[in-house]
């Protein structure tokens, strides 16, 4: 947990983009809930056989919410992945700056290819952490 909190501390430089991603994810969830509720209402109301004029507003709400859901999901994914890639670039330079002073004394015991592979693999593994696990629980969508 301590490591995860440290990884989350790197997000402080991108707090506004993270807040935007959370807002867009919340809009997507609200749109999804309203879409499902209105679709259920439409199915139940259509079973009773009312005039089509009575159902026009719910039909338009279903259309609006389906477009809103898709658009907010796309925008949330774009923003969260943009933050992730910016963060990974910053972490790669941070790791290199920390590792470079160790080069003469510590790294002579290691093969350069092994070190490079480990650094790249470790930082790239964080690509899965930030958009997937750092997202609030309410915004966990497949």
Image (tube, helix red, strand yellow):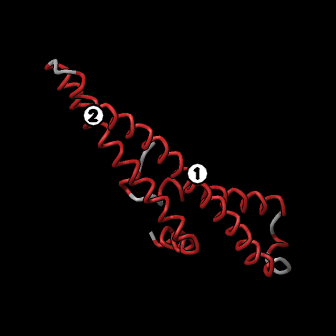
Left or right position of 107 against 11? right
Badge 2 density bin: few <14, some 14–19, many ≥20, Cα 10 Å: some
Residues 114 and 65: in front is 65
* Dot in front, 2 or 1: 2
Q: Residue furthest left?
A: 48
**Quadrant of res 130:** bottom right
Instruction: Name the residue at 79% across, 77% down.
Output: 106
To which quarter of the image does residue 48 belong?
top left
Q: Label 1: state its secondary structure.
A: helix
The residue singled out by tag 2 in the image is 58
Labelled pair 2, 1 in contact (Cβ < 8 Å): no
**Which residue is tagged 1?**
78
Q: Position of residue 1 (x, y in %)?
A: 44, 68
Who comes first in sequence, dot 2 or dot 1? 2
The dot on residue 63 is none
Name the spot of residue 96 as percent of width and height, x first. Answer: 76, 72
Under circle 2, the secondary element is helix
Q: In this view, does 82 lie above or below 2?
A: above
In the depicted view, which residue is nearer to us: 48 or 105?
A: 48
């Amino acid at each position: 947990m301590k490591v995860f909190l440290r990884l989350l501390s790197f997000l402080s430089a991108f707090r506004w983009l993270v807040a935007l991603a959370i807002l867009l994810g919340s809009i997507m969830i609200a749109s999804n809930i309203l879409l499902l509720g209105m679709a259920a209402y439409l199915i139940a109301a259509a079973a009773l056989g009312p005039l089509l004029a009575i159902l026009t507003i719910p039909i338009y709400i279903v259309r609006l919410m389906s477009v809103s859901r898709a658009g907010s999901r796309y925008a949330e994914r774009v923003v969260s992945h943009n933050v992730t890639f910016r963060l990974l670039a910053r972490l790669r330079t941070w790791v290199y700056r920390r590792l470079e002073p160790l080069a003469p004394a510590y790294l002579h015991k290691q093969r350069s290819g092994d070190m490079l592979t480990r650094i790249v693999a470790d930082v790239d593994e964080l690509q899965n952490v930030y958009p997937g696990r750092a997202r609030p629980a309410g915004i966990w969508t497949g």
